[in-house]
Amino acid sequence: MTMSAAGAEPIGRFGEYGGQFVPESLMAALAELDRERLSAFADSTFLTELDHLRRIVIGRPTPLYLAQRLTAEVGGARIWLKREDAAFTGAHKINNTVGQLLLAQRMGKMRVIAETGAGMHGVATAAAAAYFGTPCEVYMGAEDTRRQSHNVARMKMLGAQVHPVSTGTQTLKDAINEALRDWVANVESTHYVIGSVVGPHPFPQLVGDLQSVIGHEARAQMLQQAGSLPDAVVACVGGGSNAIGIFRGFLDDPGVAIYGVEAAGSGEAGAPHSAAVGLGRPGVLHGSRSYLLQDGDGQVLPAHSVAPGLDYPGVGPEHSMLKDSGRVAYLSANDSEAVSAFQALASREGILPALEPSHAVARGMDLARDLGEGADVLVCLSGRGDKDVDIVAREVGL
């Protein structure tokens, strides 16, 4: 297995991670999804339609943008942004939802459900479902519905039914739990559009494959616009789909250093955070074995980030494998660093980034300083920050 393929083994593993830790009632649906996934990606008609939808529904290819003023402000390496915020609906999530809705249509599943944290996956699922004429229901933690009310309204305008989840911490983990319960009860008619590279096999592989368009585009664009591959690639990691998407384009290039950036929360000792790879240990969550935040008894710990999309106590199994292999280094950025990076990119480039990739921008700026002039740093700007304006305004006292 090459690193770029990063493929799950026949039993659905990325090394020792992944697998299918689910009720027996879901095993047939997962087997069906895996068969249809493999068949679809070997079918030229499906791939042609997917490519067409990427152009007209997603707006691909997204631009590669040289952040000249931010580069000058930071000093050192040139900072490039892969502009997934320019995708229709405003984030990389649409790459996954369009592909999964096309696959659901192929399987004859007439209803789709999804979970969402920051709301961007919910918006992307609702938009894709509207395009395909498919009923859509989205589960979202009640705390996240308050933090991201703008996206709740967008989902409803796109025709989706939104279910606030009031159990647990009322965030992404709990939304996934409720979506899984729905799927168990309605598995014959419903496809669960998981939003990240998490969950039981084949979801981590499927979502990674659909998001890999980011990395393949970025690699070709860097060669064309910069004349060489980047020295470093940086992406934020919650569940980790935008990161796997861009990493897949560079894993086989040993001269390219790759960094995932997790959320360190407030950064205070003992305070909740979302650094599952850096500070967690292997365990099972949402049907898959991966690194996760847990106490000494194996109970899942609450996660926190100023960015709702990073507020998750686990990480995708492919990230867990990449961490153990040493191919990807996992760093962290705290809430204040992310907010500062948000402000820097907004004031220097006229781009409002989502708070999730603002974590990657923060560490990307540091890497640019460290690498110095003549080097190139590529940051995955996974979403736009309209949804986070109120949060940032409160954080900085506007």
Image (cartoon, grey):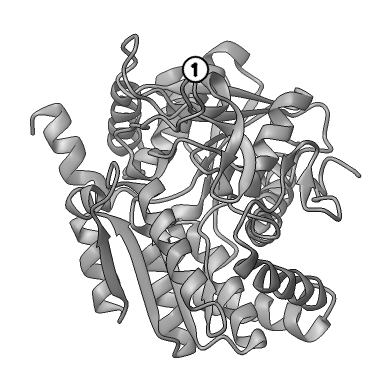
Q: Is residue 238 visible?
A: yes
Q: Position of residue 28 (x, y in %)?
A: 70, 73
**Residue 72 or residue 247, whichever sits in front:** 247
**Residue 350 or residue 238, whichever sits in front:** 238
Task: Kindly identify the residue that appears in the image at 31 percent across and 45 percent down.
Answer: 352
**Residue 84 or residue 197, whichever sits in front:** 197
**Is residue 77 placed above or below 50 in the rendered structure?**
above
Is residue 248 found left or right of 360 in the rendered image?
Answer: right
Image quadrant where residue 243 sits: top right
**Is residue 105 placed above or below 329 in the rendered structure?**
below
Task: Kindly identify the residue that appears in the image at 29 percent across and 44 percent down.
Answer: 168
Image quadrant where residue 40 sits: bottom right
Is residue 229 found left or right of 371 in the rendered image?
Answer: right
Q: For the view shown, which residue lies furthest in the right direction?
A: 1
**Is residue 188 placed above or below 183 in the rendered structure?**
below
Identify the residue under disc 1.
Answer: 366
Q: Position of residue 333 (x, y in %)?
A: 42, 22
Task: Kindly identify the residue that appears in the image at 24 percent across and 64 percent down.
Answer: 152
Is residue 179 found left or right of 386 in the rendered image?
Answer: right
Packing grade of label 1 (10 A; few <14, some 14-19, many >=20) is some
**Residue 388 or residue 144, whichever sits in front:** 144
Task: Describe the element under mark 1 as helix, strand or loop.
Answer: helix
Q: Is residue 209 visible?
A: no
Q: Position of residue 332 (x, y in %)?
A: 48, 22
Q: Amino acid at mark 1?
A: Asp
Quadrant containing the C terminus in the rendered view: top left
Q: Position of residue 161 (x, y in %)?
A: 29, 76
